[in-house]
């Protein structure tokens, strides 16, 4: 997808003014946050499970080549194929090639953030293959022609009313002319329309939450079961995933599964955990004719051994964005690229370049809540700070900001000068403030502050001034 | 003060730039509380700021220079105490990281980190203070500032001491752990987002119907007071140390003497 990350500030302004978005996001806050908190409290060993999951992922990243080779070996042994792709373009071409091999006119798709990362849908459409999203949220935003705004709830920015309108507008051609308003009716209507598409599709594309090295299986977790239908009823199942998703054994993945759903939606387990191992065998009753795993690197391996490697532990649960006060104020689209919220602020600059994405790691208060709830304990604020340092060194941030910090630091590094300057400035500000009721309604050098807040005035003489004068 | 009970603990007060410049009352309240806890207090003259504005802007070189200045200023004390979770967190967690791999300064940073504490948690956890001699007729609500809460695990310490203030009742804020949107330079750089965050916060604060809003960090307090005042709210905003020290005779943040 085309990056809009540079437009963060304008997009934020628009998002804040959008009452529908505010309503939609408030549901997220009360729903997922409360549910995660209950789920974490309900499992005595939750913190220990997190530690175990972190250790496991660190071990995998230290031995990534070994486990990927093992995974490929097992996939091949089951009759499938692994396609390693270094770049997004390579992955797109590989998938298009597979679609052509199977003569695909339509493909059904389960939810996949990696597919978003490589902008698969517009590419397939441009090449005469129609992709049909089967995850309800993805289906909604496909109708709305929008990108996902959340990594597990792609349409979380939409209110129920907006979905009613959308279905009413698009489902008429299937003979559905009534505008439905009950969530259950809306789901049933979408389900009915999608049902036939599963049978018509030539290729089913899904993502993968995990790749199991010992068995060559891929795993998806969903709450709708759409993934199962997407991959079992088609002549071929194409899995699009990335190299950081590999896990040694089924035993290992059970550890991660226990923290994943609890962190994401507060469920103990997602409704469906689907394992796919190779194509249909001779005596199987059903299953896809072909099994292909497209594994994307797209710069991920460059992170290995760097201070940003911890990002690769991410299991895409979405807890960081559910708990982020910035995300909850501006929504996912404001971030302007595939991965929103704190994990996006850490990841997107790697994919887009810090020049393009510099707002994302800067637009955080470093409140630390993301790191607190991240099941993989990714130090998201630290990674964002690394990006800020890179942006500062490359002089990407606004000149006025850098100049401001440098000027302030010039004084802060020189205690005597600092003392003198602050003593004078605070006396002036204190005096000005005392005749204005103790606060300023506008300040020319801090208009960002005073646009929506008063600026409390300083008391007058600084603490150091008074302390030195002997006051106790 | 178990380990140091043989002599009075000598505390170096890290005033913090916002208390020094904006609200000296908090500095004097901190001194009073520390003296009452049996400490001696000194205020090194060469301190300025912990360096967070530079650190969080990505200016590592200036941050290190400021950090070296702070470390040198406070090395001789038994404890370093700051009336701010954010600045104490900077000294305690970020200074050692800043000097990783620098044999000399890493050691000095770690030694400073080990004896650095935020004011209220120092009083309860180190100095063994169990009650304060203060009175306040009214209800208060408390905002847990992010750094204090998450980096230093300060949560029940201020509530414990506030519980011993005569006449004070606590009305908990359901979103006490949600960031107010200050974020240092964030509040200027991303002003629209910051204002949206603090507006939601102000709405929640008003819903508690408390007479006072307290917190342990000046940044958050200036932000929340600024928004509440803009909305015309009557809620008074103060640093928790002012209440614990019984120094509420000064006008609240963003106010002047009542005429």
Image (cartoon, grey):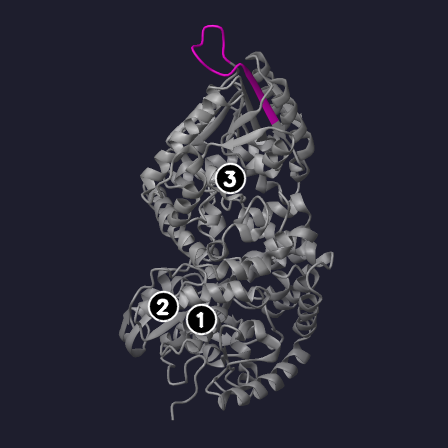
Q: Are marks 2 and 1 in contact (CB under 8 Å)?
A: yes
Residue that protrudes farthest toward the right in the picture:
A394
For the stretch drawn in magenta, the main secondary structure is loop
Residue that protrudes farthest toward the top in the picture:
A283
The foreground one among A362 and B49 is A362
Residue at numbered disc 3? A142
Q: Where A53 falls versus B106 (above or below)?
A: above
The foreground one among B105 and B83 is B83
Residue at numbered disc 2? B205
Q: What's the distance in space between the residues labelled 1 and 3, CA to CA?
A: 41 Å
> Does A282 lie within the magenta span?
yes
Instruction: Give the image location of residue A399, x and y in percent.
Output: 71, 66
The foreground one among A291 and B17 is A291
Q: Report the residue at 44% width, 31% height from top.
A: A221
Of the numbered discs 2 and 1, the one sitting upstream in the chain is: 2
Q: What's the distance in space between the residues labelled 2 and 1, CA to CA?
A: 9 Å
Residue at numbered disc 1? B224
Q: Secondary structure at mark 2?
A: helix
The answer, for residue A201, to whether it is visible in the render is yes
Quadrant of res B258: bottom left
Quadrant where the N terminus of chain A sits is: top right
């Amino acid at each position: 997808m085309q990056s809009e990350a540079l437009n963060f500030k304008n997009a934020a302004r628009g998002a804040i003014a959008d009452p529908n978005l505010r309503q939609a996001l408030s549901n997220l806050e009360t729903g997922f946050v409360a549910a995660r908190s209950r789920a974490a409290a309900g499992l005595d060993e939750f913190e220990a499970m997190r530690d175990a999951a972190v250790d496991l992922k660190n071990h995998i990243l230290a031995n990534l080549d070994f486990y990927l080779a093992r995974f490929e070996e097992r996939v091949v042994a089951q009759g499938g194929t692994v396609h390693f792709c270094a770049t997004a373009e390579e992955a797109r071409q590989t998938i298009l090639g597979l679609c052509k091999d199977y003569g695909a006119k339509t493909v059904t798709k389960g939810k996949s953030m990696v597919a978003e990362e490589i902008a698969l849908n517009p590419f397939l459409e441009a090449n005469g293959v129609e992709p049909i999203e089967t995850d309800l949220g993805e289906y909604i935003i496909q109708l709305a022609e929008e990108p996902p705004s959340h990594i597990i709830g792609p349409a979380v920015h939409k209110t129920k009313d907006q979905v009613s309108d959308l279905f009413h507008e698009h489902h008429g051609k299937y003979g559905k002319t009534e505008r439905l308003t009950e969530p259950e009716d809306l789901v049933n209507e979408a389900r009915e329309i999608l049902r036939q598409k599963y049978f018509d599709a030539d290729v089913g594309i899904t993502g993968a939450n995990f790749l199991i090295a010992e068995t060559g299986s891929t795993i998806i977790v969903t709450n709708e079961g759409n993934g199962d239908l997407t991959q079992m009823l088609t002549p071929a199942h194409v899995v699009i995933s990335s190299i950081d998703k590999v896990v040694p054994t089924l035993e290992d993945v059970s550890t991660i599964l226990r923290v994943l759903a609890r962190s994401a939606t507060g469920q103990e387990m997602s409704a469906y955990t689907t394992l796919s191992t190779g194509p249909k065998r001779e005596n199987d009753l059903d299953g896809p004719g072909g099994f292909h795993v497209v594994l994307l690197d797209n710069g991920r391996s460059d992170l290995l051994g760097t201070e940003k490697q911890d990002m690769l532990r991410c299991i895409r649960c979405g807890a960081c964005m559910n708990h982020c006060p910035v995300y909850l104020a501006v929504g996912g689209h404001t971030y302007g690229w595939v991965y929103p919220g704190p994990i996006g602020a850490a990841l997107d600059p790697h994919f887009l370049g810090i020049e393009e994405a510099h707002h994302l790691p800067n637009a955080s208060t470093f409140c630390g809540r993301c790191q607190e709830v991240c099941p993989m304990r990714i130090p998201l604020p630290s990674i964002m700070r690394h990006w800020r340092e890179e942006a500062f060194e490359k002089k990407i941030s606004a000149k006025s900001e850098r100049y401001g910090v440098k000027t302030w630091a010039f004084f802060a590094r020189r205690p005597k000068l600092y003392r003198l300057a602050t003593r004078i400035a605070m006396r002036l500000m204190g005096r000005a403030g005392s005749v204005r009721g103790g606060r300023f309604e506008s300040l020319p050098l801090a208009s960002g502050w005073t646009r929506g807040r008063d600026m409390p005035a300083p008391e007058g003489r600084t603490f150091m001034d008074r302390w030195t004068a002997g006051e106790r | 003060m178990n380990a140091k009970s043989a002599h009075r603990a000598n505390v170096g007060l890290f005033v913090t730039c916002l208390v020094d410049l904006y609200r000296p009352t908090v500095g004097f309240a901190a001194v009073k509380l520390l003296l009452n806890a049996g400490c001696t207090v000194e205020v090194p003259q060469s301190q300025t700021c912990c360096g967070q504005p530079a650190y969080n802007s990505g200016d590592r070189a200036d941050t290190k220079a400021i950090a070296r200045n702070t470390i040198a200023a406070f090395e001789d004390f038994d404890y370093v105490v700051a009336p701010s979770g954010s600045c104490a967190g900077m000294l305690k967690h970020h200074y050692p990281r800043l000097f990783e791999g620098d044999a000399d300064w890493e050691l000095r940073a770690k030694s400073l980190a080990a004896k650095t504490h935020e004011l209220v948690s120092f009083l309860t956890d180190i100095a063994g203070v169990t009650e304060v001699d203060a009175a306040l007729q009214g209800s208060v609500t408390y905002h847990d500032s992010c750094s204090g809460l998450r980096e230093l695990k300060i949560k029940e310490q201020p509530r414990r001491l506030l519980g011993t203030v005569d006449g004070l009742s606590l009305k908990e804020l359901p979103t006490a752990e949600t960031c107010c949107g200050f974020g240092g330079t964030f509040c200027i750089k991303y002003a629209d987002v910051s204002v949206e965050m603090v507006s939601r916060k102000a709405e929640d604060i008003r819903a508690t119907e408390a007479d006072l809003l307290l917190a342990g960090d000046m940044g958050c307090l200036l932000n929340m007071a600024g928004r509440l005042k803009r909305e015309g709210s009557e809620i008074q905003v103060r640093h928790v140390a002012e209440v614990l020290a019984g120094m509420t005779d000064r006008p609240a943040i963003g106010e002047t003497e009542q005429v």
